[in-house]
Amino acid sequence: AQGAARAATAELSERWDVAVDLWSATSYKRLREEALAVERRNRLHPMDPAEVPLVTRLLSDSEGPVVAVSDYQKLVPGQVARWIPRPYHTLGTDGFGRSDTREALRRFFEVDTGHVVVAVLHALAREGTIDPAVVAEAIAHHGLDTEIADPGRADTVPEPGQGVGHSDGDDGARST
């Protein structure tokens, strides 16, 4: 997903005139643990100045929505949502073993470049920063099927051409 995020950042800047700050989280689990420890410390030391979790401090000085893109399930980046100081949207591979390559997996689970671009533009449109027509244009530009079944549902079956099975034994999905 990191490659898709980098490619989306370039496209958003060049094609859609949207400036993006790209961050990398090496461990959402550790960010969550640190934020919970800060909450606990603040709760148990009410007379001391309140501390702020690292993820909140890091994202406080920037503007706009935050879109987290992961090769893990959406719930992995979602575990820090309450400490993100702005609108927060997650994209992730909610499943595994349903595509023959990592590229096909990312397309199927909507974490490829096109879906990342659309997610960022949609988040900006929801804020009123851009016109929703820009989102529709990006959907058309990337040839995204807006009527395809939700890949996050267990009963979703890939359409022909989306890839099923494993050709290399590595589906790109991971667990934590």
Image (spheres, rainbow, N blue to C red):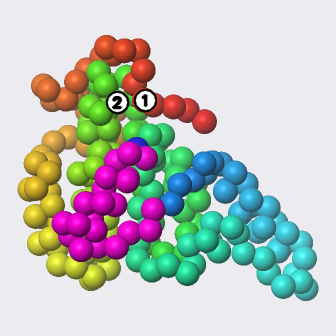
The answer to whether residue 95 is magenta is: no
- Residue type indicated by callout 2: Arg
Residue neighbourhood size for the residue with mark 2, other residues' Cα within 10 Å, grouped as few (<14), some (14–19), many (≥20): some
Q: Which mark is residue 102?
A: 2
Residue tagged by mark 1? 172
Residue sitting at x 63%, y 48%: 27
- Residue type indicated by callout 1: Gly
Where 50 falls versus 91 (above or below)? below
The answer to whether residue 21 is magenta is: yes
Please name the predominant secondary structure of the magenta segment in the image: helix
Residue sitting at x 51%, y 60%: 23
Magenta stretch: give its range: 2-22
Task: State the CA–CA distance, disc 1 to disc 2.
Answer: 5 Å
Residue 154: x and y in percent read: 34, 32
Res 53 quadrant in image:
bottom right
Observer able to see residue 85: yes
Left or right of 108? Residue 43 is right
Q: Which mark is residue 103?
A: none
Where 112 falls versus 118 (above or below)? above
Query: For numbered disc 2, what is the local secondary structure?
Result: helix
Left or right of 73? Residue 111 is left
Tell me the quadrant of the picture where the N terminus can be found: top left
